[in-house]
Image (spheres, coloured by chain):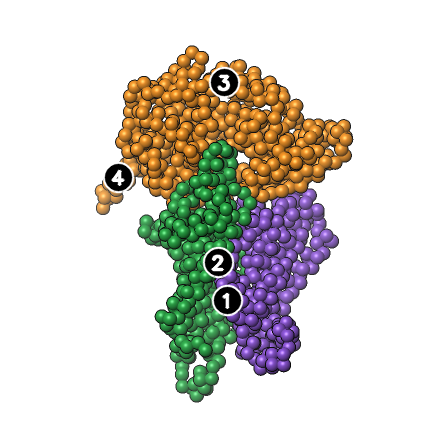
Amino acid sequence: MTLASQIEIVAPRRRFRGLRKLVRNRGALFGGAIVIFFVVLAVFAPLLATHDPFASSFTSIRKPPSAEFLLGTDEIGRDIFSRLLYGARASLMAGVVSVAIALAIGVPLGLVAGYFGGLVDGGISRVIEALLAIPSLILAIALAATLGPSLMNAMLAIGIAATPIFVRLTRGQVLAVKTEDYVEGARAIGLPHILIIIRYILPNVLSPVVVQATITIATAIIAEASLSFLGLGQQPPNPSWGSMLNTAKNFMTQAPWMSIFPGGAIFLVVLGFNLLGDGLRDALDPRDN
Amino acid sequence: MLKLIVRRILVAVPTLIILSMIIFGLQRLLPGDPIQTMMAEESDPQVIEFLREKYRLNEPMPMQYLAWVGNVLQGDFGSSLRTGIPVTEMILQKLPITVQLASMAMIMAMLIGIPAGILAAVRKNSAVDYAANAVALSGMSVPNFWLGIILIMVFAVSWKILPASGYVPITQDFWLSIRSMLMPAFVLSTAVAAYLMRHTRSAMLSVLSSDYIRTARAKGLLSNTVIIKHALRNALMPIVTLATLLFGDLLAGAVLTEQIFVIPGFGKLIVDAVFTRDYAVVQGVVLFTAIGFIAMNILTDVLYIVINPRLRHPQ
Amino acid sequence: MKKLVVGATLLALMGSTAFAADLNVALQDDPDILDPHRGNTFVGRMVFGPMCDTLFDIDTSLNIVPRLVADWTWSEGDTVLTMNLREDALFHDGTPVNGEAVKANLERALNLPESNRKAELASIASIEVLGETQVAITLKAPDAAFLANLTDRAGMMVSPATFDTAGEGGLVCAGPYKFVERIQNDRIVMEKFAEHWDADNYHFDQVIYRPIPDTTVRLANLQSGDLDIIERPAPSDMEAIKADSNLVFDIVTGLGFYGVNFNMGNGDRSQSPINQDKRLREALNLTIDRNVLNEVLGMGTYPPAYQPFSTASWAYNPEFDGGERDIERAKALMAEAGHESVSFEILYANNSAMQSLFELVQAMASEAGFNITLRPTEFAAYVDEREAGNFEVSQFGASGRIDPDGNFHRYLACGSAGNVGNYCNDELTDLLNQARVINDVEQRKALYDEAQRIAAEDLPALYFYYTPRTWAYSANLEGFVPYADGVLRLAGLKPKE
């Protein structure tokens, strides 16, 4: 995971011009389409699934894709297509919830650190630097192991591990905006800090945060797959692409379809979010030529 | 300059202290007892008690923390609970391995990413540009562990041209060592190459679109190669700093790749130690890699200032 | 030119038999401390095999045979063991393996605070050195498992001059190979000890053990030729190995098993209905189709288990086998016990094999009305939870011991260290204690049979399958002999001519 290297600082801009630019970006549209496709699959999984994702069949062990089992069966005879659909729920949730947690903790901390400066900033920044110095996957593994292996705890662990990025990003943005005239003006007329932060500063830090959030969803999905791969994420028998890959790797030569489809699904979803994030960055970056 | 370095080091000290507390505390929060985990099938209560005393596991946490810090300051990082091997010895054994892996990955990433970025910048918005971007994004999106297993299956089992796993010391057999690391280094390089490609492209574009280059081109004063060389020189700065930061990431982050390719580097060591609750190893190795990471960051800042003198006097 | 070629070829041909190759072996895990008195892992035992000779050894039928001890006698009443050591055994540092050394080792194993061999040697009352190569051990009471324990780590001899550094500083033993170096998680290297008394029987210059936890990667390395032998290939890889003409698949019945045990008295969770009523446990037993487990999980290599002893053990009794799946009977028993459905949780250590096993168990048992929740945890937490009694039903596995006592007493006798469910039946414990102090196999078997009848009534544990000892190795090797204890013995193993 290279969370530490995804930082970019952008000056404040209006939003709607960006939206128009976004729609014209083919890459972003393609990415968005992929994301929406998988969201639809996840939401309508009960309707689309051909089998019960938990139903094992001792007579259909590791069967290749067929009319009955669209993507084949796994090591205890469960339909991979159906498990893939339900697994989409776990993976997408893992991506979105982790980032939501990171945003919920990280953005306020970044706002506070950047706005108030001084000791508060010093303290928060030191802790964030300390967290960033620990490899993020290790941190996530340690947290997930502490909390106990489960999807929820994995999301919490990944969210906490991703928080420092948002703290740094937000703080950087706040520092850039803090000295602008309209902020000085607001201070001069005596508006309370909280109002200044919410009305004047927050809207201007949102753009890069949104871009970062989209890209971090992609990283979080891979992180969940990695944790499941190590046995710390979504626990069986609940389906998750990462844990499906974990079992599939034992049968690579006998049943390659067990790994191709979950691995491919992870790849596509992550690609979708990355394309979307790319498009957002281009749309919202005033320096684009 | 010196004042800057000293200041950065001083600032790093509280960070390290907080880091040591986080990693120490997090370890102890993990459920399960390291001694009992070690014993598993053969639990003899007397031996368990003795070992708990020996490793001071019965003392209150702050005491254990202080004892550990005290030892670290004297250069003693403790020993593995599981194997008895001193942590410093393990670090020295594994450092060259991890450095080799990270270096090879970095070199591959640069060889792939930088030329691709230049090409994409020069042929901006053409099919080449889009293709390069697509490949870069794919590299960033593919799960490492999946790519690794597929590569092993193709290159090691089916075609038998590369070793399936393991590590051969570079002093023992140079070419075999390189060949053994090719696949894992490649897997690690995919994401880094992607970042490098994109950053090179945008840095190049920045420079290429700057006024003086445009003027010179419009006036027909400079040939294409000169322009590209000039652009590259100026684009080098953000690329170099990014490369240094990524190197720090690589050093400790190759966790899953090391598992799959059975490379006995830091990543595998830490993960295994977390699962066996080998406290001393996790604390010692994470502290060591963190110090390395912080040192990398300071180096990056220094490099930045050396290359761009305008930054020598911050406002 | 022709002469040169012919000459070179001849040299090469001669050389291929004169220059012994290296042997590369893959292990499932990285061993822990390399000190036989302190080591705890099965893979550690594998590594000690070629490095540390034991006082006694076993043959393929699990009979005790001489190793460092040339011959031995028991006194009347089986309380004094007089051993005559070989005259020509040397430690790797050149010192002789004599009576003093043996005594020093046994005392270290007994007295070192961190020694994990105390329980195995607990019956020793005193040790006397009668001569340069004669030692007499006096036991407090007859101990049926004593010799068997001396074929394992408790009987390994370490050079007394190196007691202080054994483990951390390199291991100096008396086996056919001596320690060269160890890089944690990477490899353990040993080279041939030329002065070993059986040196001619060992044909490799160096033996290198490499821990590779992932079965796919282990096999890939074997297929690509980077490894010569791998232990425990995955059952699902068996077909591929057999189909490959360059590889050989070998299997023997092991001594260990997997199943579940019930929390009969360790804390609150022993109050769960399944732990209180043996009819429910019997019903659960009837829902498990062990043949399906064998086929699906083991590809035919997981023999169904109904008792703690596998067919490799003399204590095995076919009387206790059988119990085909019978859902109707299971439901009837549950109804009799007053439950239409029963819920409980199975705790297990998370890895793919256990995951598949318990998912299957969950599915099979649900047909009779058992609602099983699965609680996988990390290994460390699993050990912790079992000790603390924080489980209702838990994964129960053992690697098995040569002596049947190690498969039964350790787990089901009152107060035993491995009895995490706190199951306590005085009659059964009594029978097992009696079986420990007699040496006569017939009598012991009768005692174990009686104990088994009680266990079959109480059902403190269910056994699902016996773990086989499996190997895959290069077809270029000959002389490979698999042993039921799973340890690799290298005598006679060599590259094919």
SS class, disc 4 = helix
- Picture quadrant where residue C201 is located: top left
Q: At x 57% / y 30%, what residue is drawn? A: C419
Task: Indicate the chain coloured green by its letter.
Answer: B
Query: In the displayed structure, would residue B167 be above or below residue C409?
Result: below
User: Of tags 4 and 3, which is closer to the observer?
Assistant: 3
Circle 2 chain: B
| Residue under label 3 | C437
| Residue under label 1 | A122
Task: Indicate the chain coloured purple by its letter.
Answer: A
In contact (CB < 8 Å): disc 2 and disc 1:
no
User: Of tags 1 and 3, which is closer to the observer?
Assistant: 1
Asked if marks 4 and 3 fall on the same chain, the answer is yes
In contact (CB < 8 Å): disc 3 and disc 2:
no
Quadrant into which the N terminus of chain B falls: bottom left
Residue A60 or residue B294, whichever sits in front: B294
Circle 1 chain: A
Spatial separation of the CA atoms under disc 4 and disc 1? 74 Å
Q: Amino acid at mark 3?
A: Val
Q: Amino acid at mark 2?
A: Ile
